[in-house]
Image (cartoon, rainbow, N blue to C red):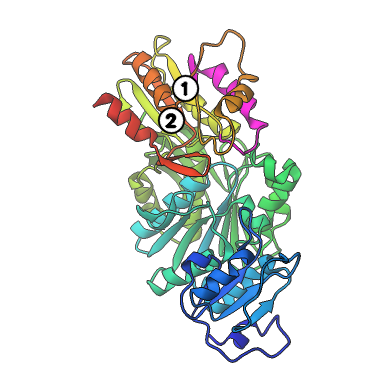
């Protein structure tokens, strides 16, 4: 695309008539003919890498001029174009370069504190099984389930999102199921994406280190449901914040509700929870049907209802959807059963509400009072500190034995994080503290009886531990398997 054609909506002055072969905001990946887009980021200021991008063959530089570093010199041999509010407009520039890929796709956006990953992952899987080429993007990575490539964030930056949409469209995928984080919404990463459908799961304490208040957190989530181009939305009728979400939905957009406790369009009744599956009867405009899913726990029935509603809203035959629901594979690191004696579960739960949901499910699995529940958990560093004692309280009130350890400490002292957690511990609770996560897991597994249940919470699918700036290989699942081998 010509540089002038790309930037014509924003830049009035005449621009050189040069071809731009690609867009890049990481100087390490710049190739000959690219437009390098430079702006301040959360970790580094991309404008400080303009010289490196130039040396790598950038054909032009697009940069944010606000508070431009005084010691950075712009190259004189290529066009360097100032672009105020560049971060806010990055999605628009990228969408224009890639010829608005979302306009040619059916895109489902899933948001909420908990449940996003399971719903988006299983939806992508279900569409694929029902004959429609579909891809997933979110916490687990991106691509065709289950063969995913990794991502740094639940929702990547605006440039990468548009590039991935374009790449998958070119590869023949007309459907994408995408997790949409509150950070992504607040930081304009999903601007200029036409979502056909948006799904709301729930809202609870999370990311208040970033949003500061639950009101700001709610507003970020709600912005997905105010987007133009939506054809329908799917809302959890049992959630406390659902009315505020519903209020922003544009007129003419169909609203489907799902739930268990309150009247809803799609409602689960007569549910039964087992150690390897869940069964429920669903009442909806499509009739009354029995549904079986391989997912564990009441919270996963909510996730299944969202998937069920979405598939039927897309027009699939109800009987085909019921058959598919039973054959969906579990989401990695979500109530993942890793061993049976003791019964070991690995789960990504890292918020008070998610941990409470998992704990209630595990308590329901106890065959007798002789079965004891062990929980290994920690809290991430440089993240919302207010939730640390809340998570401790949730665990202590429902577990028999608690092992507090490290999660991803990042740049915080792991012992300081554990001290924060300890302020929420219940008096007389059976608590052991082991900073080393491997040691903590091994302690719980060696101490638990063969009929006991061990939950290892917080990291789920992750195969690394973040200590400082390093991502060190670490997998809860691998640790369990190595222990029993």
Give the SS element for disc 2. strand
The image shows residue 28 at horizontal and vertical percentages of 48, 65
Q: Is residue 391 part of the magenta span, yes or no?
A: yes
Q: Residue lying farthest left?
A: 485
Where, quadrant-wise, is the C terminus in this rendering? Answer: top left
Q: Which residue is the site of mark 1?
A: 375
The answer to which of 163 and 270 lies nearer the viewer is: 163
Q: Residues in magenta?
A: 380-404
Residue 51 place in picture, x, y as percent: 57, 71
Q: Considering only vertical position in the picture, is 303 above or below 482?
A: below
Question: Where residue 272 is drawn, which disc sits there?
Answer: 2
- Residue 19 visible here: yes
- The answer to which image quadrant residue 189 occupies is bottom right
Residue 54: mark: none
Q: Nearer the viewer, residue 340 or 255?
A: 340
Rendered location of residue 403, percent (x, y): 48, 19
The residue lying at 41 percent from left, 38 percent from top is: 295
**Is 207 rendered above or below residue 160?**
above
Residue 241 appears in the picture as rendered:
no
| Up/down of 70 relative to 9, above or below | above
Instruction: Name the element at disc 1.
Output: strand
Residue drawn where x is 70% and y is 62% of the image: 250
**Viewed as shown, does residue 130 lie left or right of 310?**
left
Circle 2: is it few (<14), some (14-19), or many (20+) Cα within 10 Å? some
Q: CA distance from mark 2 to mark 1?
A: 24 Å
Front residue of this view, candidates 279 and 204: 204
Q: Earlier in the sequence, mark 2 or mark 1?
A: 2
Total numbered labels placed on residues in the image: 2
Q: Position of residue 92 (x, y in %)?
A: 63, 72
Query: What residue is rendered at 45% in x and 65% in y?
Result: 175
């Amino acid at each position: 695309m010509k540089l002038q054609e790309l930037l014509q909506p924003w830049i009035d002055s005449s621009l050189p008539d040069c071809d731009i072969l690609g867009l890049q905001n990481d100087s390490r990946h710049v190739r000959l003919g690219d437009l390098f887009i430079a702006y301040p980021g959360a970790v580094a200021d991309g404008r400080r890498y303009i010289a490196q991008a130039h040396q790598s063959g950038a054909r032009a530089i697009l940069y944010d001029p606000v508070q431009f570093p005084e010691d950075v010199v712009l190259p004189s041999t290529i066009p360097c174009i100032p672009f105020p509010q560049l971060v806010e407009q990055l999605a628009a520039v990228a969408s224009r370069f890639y010829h608005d890929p979302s306009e040619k796709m059916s895109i489902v956006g899933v948001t909420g504190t908990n449940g996003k990953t399971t719903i988006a992952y299983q939806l992508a899987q279900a569409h694929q099984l029902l004959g429609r080429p579909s891809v997933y993007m979110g916490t687990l990575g991106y691509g065709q389930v289950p063969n995913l490539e990794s991502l740094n964030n639940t929702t990547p930056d605006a440039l990468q999102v548009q590039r991935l949409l374009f790449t998958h469209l070119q590869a023949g995928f007309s459907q994408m199921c995408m997790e949409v984080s509150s950070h992504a919404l607040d930081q304009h990463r999903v601007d200029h994406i036409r979502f056909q459908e948006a799904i709301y799961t729930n809202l609870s304490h999370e990311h208040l280190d970033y949003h500061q208040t639950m009101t700001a957190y709610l507003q970020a989530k709600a912005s997905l449901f105010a987007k133009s181009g939506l054809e329908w939305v799917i809302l959890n009728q049992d959630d406390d914040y659902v009315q505020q979400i519903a209020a922003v939905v544009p007129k003419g957009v169909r609203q489907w509700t799902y739930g268990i406790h309150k009247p809803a369009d799609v409602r689960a009744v007569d549910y039964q929870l087992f150690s390897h599956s869940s069964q429920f009867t669903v009442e909806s405009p499509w009739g009354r049907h029995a549904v079986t899913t391989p997912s564990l726990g009441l919270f996963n029935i909510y996730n299944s209802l969202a998937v069920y509603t979405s598939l039927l809203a897309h027009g699939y035959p109800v009987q085909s959807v019921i058959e598919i629901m039973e054959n969906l594979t579990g989401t990695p690191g979500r109530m993942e059963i890793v061993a049976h004696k003791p019964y070991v579960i690995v789960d990504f739960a890292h918020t008070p509400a998610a941990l409470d949901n998992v704990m209630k499910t595990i308590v329901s699995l106890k065959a007798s009072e002789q079965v004891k529940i062990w929980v290994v958990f920690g809290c991430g560093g440089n993240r919302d500190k207010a939730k640390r004692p809340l998570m401790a309280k949730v665990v202590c009130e429902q577990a028999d034995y608690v092992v507090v350890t490290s999660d991803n400490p990042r740049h915080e002292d792991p012992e300081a994080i554990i001290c924060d957690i300890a302020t929420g511990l219940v008096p007389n609770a059976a608590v052991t503290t082991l900073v080393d996560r491997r040691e903590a897991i091994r302690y719980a597994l060696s101490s638990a009886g063969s009929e006991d249940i061990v939950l290892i919470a917080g990291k789920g699918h992750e195969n690394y531990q973040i200590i400082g700036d390093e991502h060190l290989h670490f997998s809860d699942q691998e640790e369990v398997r190595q222990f029993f081998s």
